[in-house]
Image (cartoon, helix red, strand yellow):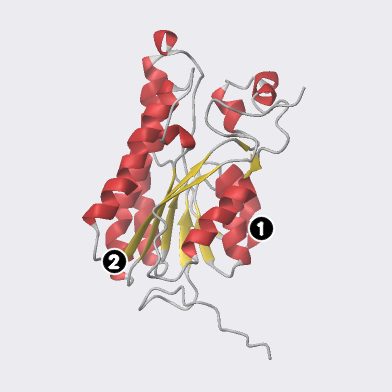
Amino acid sequence: MIVVMPPADTAVPGAPSTPRALVTGASTGIGAATVRRLRAEGWDVLATARRTDRLAALAAETGCATHPADLTSPDDVAALAEHVRGTGPLRALVNNAGGAIGADPVEAGRAEDWQRMYEINVLTTLRLTQALLPTLRADGGGDVVVVTSTAAHDTYPGGAGYAAAKHAERMIPATLRLELVGQPIRVVEIAPGMVRTEEFSLNRLHGDADAAANVYAGVAEPLVADDVADAIVWTLTRPAHVNIDSLVIRPRAQASNTLVAREG
């Protein structure tokens, strides 16, 4: 006799029957893949990024809602938060926006690149999380997801600026989880390793397509954006009492930030 069990209850008490998420950095890569995954799971999704044409294409493909914003602008963050509050309850905030600039050694690193990486990785996550925590509470609780990197847990030659920014960003969920204990808000960190996306390495290496391709040269199967999106959605769909504090996800070929199996 086969007994079919009902699915685990993943709903937050008092939350709407159709959960709603805000995904940042949704114009490409992991952010866009997360929007697709959540929509496939039946979520309502509000996607945000700077590039309106990319957002429009994603909306046409998935049926998500969109709100363009530059999260380095406090005014844009305030307008986005107001839009979220005015368009329905919020179940999850996925802080995915960020990126790397350059691969210079510490001795040659440009302070302005370090400053920009701190701004786009750390302060964007801080501003939006601060703006929407009251909304998550008012809507019955929910989840804050922060997409960091394995660079948030270690470093590598040429990676100090990005690792410094991601280490700082990781302290937001690590500390917030302590500060919110006992409240109906889960705080999750997702730390991807080597992920081959359309733009991450290309942007980091200032548009040098050959150098960007060499990052993944000989690696049999680097992660793709959908692998990370799958992990994000998995954490969001655990039973409400289960918090995935921190999840490191790498391709099998990558044992650490500096040890990667390459063919040839």
Crowding at mark 1 (Cα within 10 Å: few <14, some 14-19, many 20+): few
> Is residue 75 visible in the rendered structure shown here?
no
Image height of 177 relative to 90, above or below: above
Residue at figure coordinates x 62%, y 49% from the top left:
227
Horizontally, residue 174 falls left or right of residue 213, namely left
Q: Nearer the viewer, residue 100 or 192?
A: 192
Q: Nearer the viewer, residue 17 or 1?
A: 1
Dot 1 lies on which element? helix
Q: Nearer the viewer, residue 231 or 53?
A: 231
Instruction: Specify the amino acid type for callout 2.
Output: Arg
Residue at figure coordinates x 54%, y 37% from the top left:
193
Q: Are marks 1 and 2 in contact (CB under 8 Å)?
A: no
Horizontally, residue 146 falls left or right of residue 1, namely left
Residue at figure coordinates x 39%, y 22% from the top left:
114
- Which mark sits nearer the N-terminus, 1 or 2? 1
Residue at figure coordinates x 59%, y 55% from the top left:
230
The quadrant where residue 250 appears = top right
Quarter holding the C terminus?
Answer: top right
The numbered dot on residue 60 is: 1
Horizontally, residue 229 falls left or right of residue 48, namely right
Instruction: Specify the amino acid type for callout 1.
Output: Ala
Judged from this view, the residue extending furthest toward the top is 107
Dot 2 lies on which element? helix
Foreground: disc 1 or disc 2: 2
The quadrant where residue 88 appears = bottom left
Q: Which residue is mark 2?
A: 137
Q: Where's residue 163, x and y in %?
A: 42, 28
